[in-house]
Image: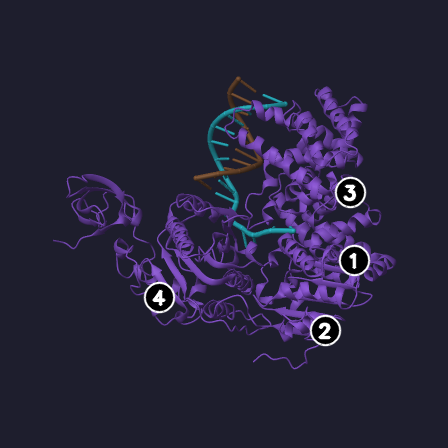
Chain colours: A purple, B cyan, C brown
DNA sequence: ATTGCTAGGTTTTTT
DNA sequence: ACCTAGCAAT
């Protein structure tokens, strides 16, 4: 069916033996520009690792001449491991890492040209916002209607497109009041970053790119150094990243990009699908290879996910196929509330475990991190071990950030954001007034906060808290003097002690203080591990790692269910996948439904579901709840996601509650809705594509019936006869709440049972006598 | 200067 | 429901 028109290059070579013809071509086409359109589960990682191995073993390229870029540390780690497995330890010299990691390594070597000192700091989003806040104060914009985050977004957007504040094109584009102010903030922010010897995430790509672009000699050197450049997940590159790739391959043009336009889900971060869609035009002699054979999923899963994504108009278009059988049907569960949904997820996973699947091969995906809480609760209730991927990161906890800010100050004495944090960690009698004094001095002289503090002390203008400030500065200096040649974790221990961070927590009566202390110990443990195992065991190396690696990147240790957002799921695969919250407003997310975006956001939401579905190897469970609370408010009606209607009905089975689209036509059908089975669902009805669940097409009743105590419409009027699975028949005494969650007080007929309080969903209303 | 309270916003996704 | 920034009280 998909046999190649090209003869197999060298099928007898052991590296090529496990590959199909297209994969072989992708591995052996080493010269020039190569675009590999790799469908989900088509063996993309295998192609990249074998290609690297092929270059080294067959073409005798030195490992250090190969550069391989990924987007996540997970992907980089996996790839590194697999390459080493294939070619041995020689592969350790391959430059393999995330774009940002490669950016840092380049910047370390290009620091002088980039105007940075060797120990420069990497600011995270939090540091960035702090800096913008300070800049806004300086520009008297603190009271403006715009928030620091908006300016941060503006700055990121500029950097993703390689636009410096003085860029003439940027100046041209500026029109609105916001743009004008944002540009001013951007300029001042850059100046501030320079005084602090700091870079942000955007800089990690933009700065090396600009250096190479402005310096033909360096560009030549770097491009000659890397003879072969490979990029994974190319659909997620932004303009700056693509430009960097062009510069790095300018001497030889050996650029191999692998990606899938259907899995482009990061446009909000500046990714341009155009990079992959227009790649052949950009590199005129591009070889294009499509990998369309899927090795991962069952036929049903593949067909269902393909059906969904094929509703998108803006795509290359691939036809994935598989030789594995159809497998089990997909399952759609209709839950009443998000809690029911979570419980069902836990129960389903438990069943899968009983049936023999290891928990480490199961995952639950959701759209927003906020959805994880209910799921966690259910997992705990059902005693299912789980790992949360993403979410609140270890290194973002306040006490950990406090300790890190001290460490950063030791490596980079000009780190203003670190200084601003460290001076309050712990509280030392220096308040905002003093900090503001320092900030003003820094502004006036164009220097960093720590330097300005020294400046004020020398001039005796540090105000009331001068002595405390002097103690702080001296402490920093003496710590800095003593760390030469020490292990990172030794320094860490010293800092925790000398700063008073640990002591302050030890006397803290807050019940969480113990947890925080344990987190600090965990930080020290991480530092020790780093000192023992890392390629660059220095403190600087540790801080760099912290800035670029989220701790939860590692997964799959132990028999635990993985829980993560659909975004983090990209690149992973699991035997059993459960996707929850498939409702309008969640997926597609409400923010993607705004007017005037030509449906592009909606298409990205659809791709997100596609990514989620295609992670599954054997079983795929989908769920939506009929009501959900947002912001802890009351349960609100939620409509099933329009994307569900795009799954062919013969691929999916509806289970659980009465199908949503029937509930409002049948009155209080919810009272019997816990009966499992297939009591007529939307899947039985022929559905036109394009979403028959949109509100305007629904029957008139918009609101789920809500019953409060004493509500005359409630089917649970006092006196109503009900039936319970184990307690038998009884009579309702009182009802409170609404829907299936109503709390009932029931006198059961059996004297042994007596009066019980229970939840409405556990009883059936008996037919009227 | 620090603590403790309230109000208001928050939830899209991440290197 | 939860977190934060901003305010009043100490």
- Mark 1, secondary structure of its residue: helix
Q: Earlier in the sequence, mark 2 or mark 3?
A: 3
Q: Label 1 to label 3, Cα distance in Å?
A: 32 Å
Nearer the observer, disc 1 or disc 3?
1
Q: Earlier in the sequence, mark 1 or mark 4?
A: 1
Horizontal relation, residue A668 to residue A528: left or right: left
- List the residue tagged with mark 3: A194
Nearer the observer, disc 1 or disc 4?
1
- Report if the CB atoms under discs 4 and 2 are less than 8 Å apart: no
Asked if marks 4 and 3 fall on the same chain, the answer is yes
Residue A218 to residue A539: above or below: below
- List the residue tagged with mark 1: A64
Nearer the observer, disc 2 or disc 3?
2
- List the residue tagged with mark 2: A286
- Report if the CB atoms under discs 1 and 2 are less than 8 Å apart: no
Asked if marks 4 and 2 fall on the same chain, the answer is yes
Asked if marks 1 and 2 fall on the same chain, the answer is yes
Residue A325, position in %: x, y? 46, 71
- Report if the CB atoms under discs 1 and 4 are less than 8 Å apart: no
Residue at position x 32%, y 57% in the image: A657
- Mark 3, secondary structure of its residue: helix
- Disc 4 crowd rating (10 Å Cα; few below 14, some 14-19, many 20+) is some
| Residue A259 vs residue A14, the one in the foreground | A14
Q: Label 2 to label 3, Cα distance in Å?
A: 40 Å
**Residue A632 visible within the image:** yes
Residue A531, position in %: x, y? 71, 40
Residue A160, position in %: x, y? 69, 55
**Residue A638 visible within the image:** no
Q: Label 1 to label 4, Cα distance in Å?
A: 57 Å
Residue A710 to residue A13: above or below: above
Q: Earlier in the sequence, mark 4 or mark 3?
A: 3
- List the residue tagged with mark 4: A682
């Amino acid at each position: 069916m998909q046999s190649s028109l090209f003869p197999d290059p060298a099928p007898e070579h052991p590296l090529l033996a496990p590959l199909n013809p297209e994969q072989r071509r992708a591995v052996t086409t080493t010269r020039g520009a190569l675009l590999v359109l790799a469908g989900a589960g088509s063996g993309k990682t295998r192609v990249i690792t074998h290609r690297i191995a092929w270059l080294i073993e067959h073409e005798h390229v030195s490992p250090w001449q190969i550069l391989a870029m990924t987007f996540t540390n997970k992907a980089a780690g996996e790839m590194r491991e697999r390459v080493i497995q294939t070619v041995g330890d020689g592969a350790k010299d391959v430059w393999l890492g995330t774009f940002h990691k490669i950016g840092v390594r380049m910047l370390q070597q290009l620091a002088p040209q980039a105007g940075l000192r060797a120990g420069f700091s990497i600011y995270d989003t939090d540091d960035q916002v702090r800096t913008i806040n300070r800049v806004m104060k300086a520009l008297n914009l603190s009271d403006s209607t715009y928030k620091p985050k908006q300016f941060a977004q503006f700055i990121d957007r500029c950097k993703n497109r390689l636009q410096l504040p003085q860029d003439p094109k940027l100046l041209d584009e500026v029109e609105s009041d916001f743009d004008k102010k944002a540009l001013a903030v951007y300029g001042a922010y850059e100046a501030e970053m320079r005084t602090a010897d700091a870079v942000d995430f955007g800089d990690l790509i933009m700065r090396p790119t600009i250096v190479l672009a402005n310096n033909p000699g360096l560009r030549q050197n770097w491009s000659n150094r890397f003879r072969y450049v490979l990029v994974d997940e190319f659909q997620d590159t932004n303009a700056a990243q693509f430009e960097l790739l062009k510069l790095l391959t300018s001497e030889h043009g050996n650029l191999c990009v692998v990606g899938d336009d259907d899995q482009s889900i990061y446009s909000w971060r500046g990714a341009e699908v155009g990079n992959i869609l227009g790649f052949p035009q950009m590199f005129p002699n591009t070889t294009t290879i499509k990998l369309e054979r899927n090795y991962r999923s069952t036929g049903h899963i593949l067909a269902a996910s393909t059906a969904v994504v094929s509703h998108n108009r803006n795509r290359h278009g691939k036809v994935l196929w598989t030789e594995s059988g159809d497998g089990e049907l997909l399952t759609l569960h209709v839950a009443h509330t998000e809690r029911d949904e979570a419980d069902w997820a836990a129960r389903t996973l438990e069943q899968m475990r009983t049936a023999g699947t290891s928990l480490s091969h199961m995952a639950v995906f959701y759209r927003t991190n906020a959805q994880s809480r209910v799921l966690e609760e259910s997992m705990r209730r059902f005693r299912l071990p789980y790992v949360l991927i993403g979410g609140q990161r270890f290194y973002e906890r306040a006490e950990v950030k406090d300790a890190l800010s001290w460490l950063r100050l030791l490596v980079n004495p000009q780190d203003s954001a670190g200084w601003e944090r460290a001076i309050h960690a712990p509280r030392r009698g220096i308040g905002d007034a003093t900090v503001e004094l320092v900030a003003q001095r820094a502004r006036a002289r164009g220097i960093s906060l720590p330097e300005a503090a020294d400046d004020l002390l020398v001039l005796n203008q540090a105000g009331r808290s001068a002595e405390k400030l002097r103690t702080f500065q001296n402490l920093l200096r003496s710590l800095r003097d003593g760390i030469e040649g020490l292990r990172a974790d030794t320094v860490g221990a010293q800092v925790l002690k000398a700063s008073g961070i640990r002591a302050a927590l030890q006397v803290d009566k807050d019940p969480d203080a113990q947890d925080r202390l344990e987190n600090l110990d965990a930080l020290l443990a991480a530092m020790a591990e780093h000192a023992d195992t890392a390629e660059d065991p220095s403190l600087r190396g540790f801080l760099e790692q912290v800035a670029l690696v989220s701790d939860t990147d590692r997964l799959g240790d132990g028999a635990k269910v993985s829980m993560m957002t659909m975004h983090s799921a990209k690149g992973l695969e699991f035997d059993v996948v459960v996707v929850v919250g498939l409702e309008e407003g969640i997926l597609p997310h409400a923010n993607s439904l705004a007017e005037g975006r030509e449906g592009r956001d909606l298409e990205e939401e659809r791709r997100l579901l596609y990514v989620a579905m295609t992670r599954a190897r054997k079983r795929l469970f989908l769920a939506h709840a009929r009501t959900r609370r947002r912001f802890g408010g009351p349960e609100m009606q939620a409509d099933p996601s329009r994307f569900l209607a795009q799954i062919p009905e013969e691929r999916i089975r509806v289970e659980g509650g009465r199908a949503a689209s029937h509930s409002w036509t049948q009155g209080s059908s919810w009272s019997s809705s816990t009966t499992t089975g297939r009591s007529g669902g939307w899947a039985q009805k022929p559905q036109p594509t394009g979403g028959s669940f949109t509100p305007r097409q629904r029957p008139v009743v918009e609101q789920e019936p809500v019953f409060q105590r004493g509500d005359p419409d409630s089917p649970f009027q006092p006196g109503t006869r009900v039936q319970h699975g184990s307690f038998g028949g009884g009579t309702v005494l009182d009802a409170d709440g609404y829907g299936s969650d109503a709390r009932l007080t029931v006198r059961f007929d059996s004297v042994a049972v007596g009066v019980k309080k229970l939840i409405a969903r556990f009883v059936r209303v008996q037919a009227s006598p």
